[in-house]
Amino acid sequence: MKSILLAAKNLEIGGIEKSLITLIHYFKENGYNVTLVLEEKKGQLLKNINKDIKIVEFKPYKRGLVSIRRIKNFIKQTKFKVKYKNKFDFSISYSTYSKPDSFVARTASKNSILWCHADYLAQFNGDIKKVKDFFEDIDYDEFSKIVFVSKRAKQTFLEIFPEQKNVYHCNNFIDSNKIYELSKEKIKLRYNQEITTFLNVSRHDEKQKKISRIIKAAALLKKEKYKFRIIFVGNGKDTPKYKYLVEKYDLSRNIFFEGSQENPYPYFKISDCVILSSDYEGYPVVFLESFLLNKPIITTDVSDFRDIQDGRGIVSSKTTKGIYKAMKQYLEKGYRLEKRFDAKKYNSKIEKQLKIILKK
């Protein structure tokens, strides 16, 4: 039986974490002995991990004097090396930005993989030096392979690191059966055919997600007497800012905050259109969820959406005006999906790519 270790920060609710769980279960179902290493053994999604999967906590010391922390972390790393050095056939550092995860994955296997979830050139506003510093900080060149979840992110990485070999593109799996089943759960909000409902599912982090664009676009649409509502599913450090903007623009009857939801899928069922306003993404899980649940998308020009949209939505510029125009277009004309998403065919392509990546 082949063994694989995956390293991540925690299992709080998020698209990356949901993708990680689906990947873990894929490995388990395909005969791998799976170990999950978490910096913090916490998160609402922990209970979704099969009980026979080993979970190890590797939590670095972050408090106290720098000199004392360094000594403690050195001892901790030494103990990890003694126990796990090259003990696994493969290892994956799944939280790209994490130095502890990088150490764990590179230690655990000679076949270590860095898994990347964003277009880092877009994330750092085109600053090549910052991209280089980011990857050098996590010792990217010591991994045997690097995987990106979007084609665009892989391309921009290779533009900056053209000498880098063994760089792959592999999308996230989607657990269609589970999502279909979870979407049947009852919630308080109901579908209202008299009013158009937009849905945003994301972490409330203005730097990346730019949800203020949706709120400001809604204020413009309200002035023009359009009827609509927007459901926000998610939470984060900028939630208070968004609630303040809703009050400022008198949108409390248009915008509803539903908080972070372990199961967001019933909200897709009561919505007409999903909306994404980010400045940068890797390959958002919400794309796949929207495709699967047959909902059109309004999205800023992030990730590979232009390449894969295939009649599934409207692409907006990364501005309030762009979001406003796209929402207005949907309110006036709607959007007809051209064909249903084939999850089985989609997952089959990923499985083939994974087999290539996991060849020693």
Image (spheres, rainbow, N blue to C red):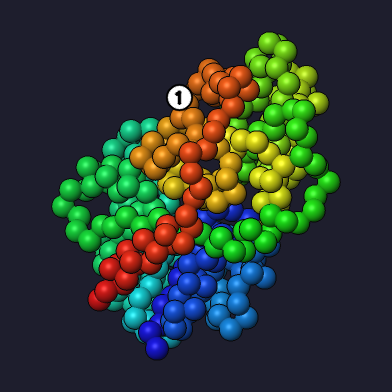
Q: Is residue 190 visible?
A: yes
State the quadrant of the N terminus.
bottom left
Compared to residue 238, the image places residue 154 above or below, namely below
Q: Nearer the viewer, residue 339 or 89?
A: 339
Q: Give the residue furthest to the left.
A: 163
Q: Is residue 124 visible?
A: no
Q: How many marks?
A: 1
Compared to residue 316, the image places residue 69 above or below, namely below
Q: Nearer the viewer, residue 84 or 344?
A: 344
- Circle 1: element type: loop
**Residue 163 in the image, given as x and y percentages of width and height:** 16, 52
Residue at the disc numbered 1: 317
Q: Place residue 194 in its image quadrant.
A: top right
Q: What residue is rendered at 80% in x and 42% in y?
A: 189
Q: Give the residue furthest to the bottom.
A: 1
Q: Is residue 160 left or right of residue 88?
A: left
Q: What residue is rendered at 38% in x and 84% in y?
A: 2
**Residue 200 in the image, given as x and y percentages of width and height:** 63, 38
Q: Nearer the viewer, residue 145 or 315?
A: 315
Q: Is residue 215 left or right of residue 358?
A: right
Q: Is residue 266 left or right of residue 151?
A: right
Q: What residue is rendered at 66% in x and 45% in y?
A: 268
**Residue 193 in the image, given as x and y percentages of width and height:** 75, 32
Q: What residue is rendered at 56% in x and 60% in y?
A: 176
Amino acid at the residue labelled 1: Ser
Q: Give the residue furthest to the right.
A: 188
State the quadrant of the C terminus.
bottom left
**Residue 228 in the image, given as x and y percentages of width and height:** 71, 25
Disc 1: CA contacts within 10 A as few (<14), some (14-19) or many (>=20): some
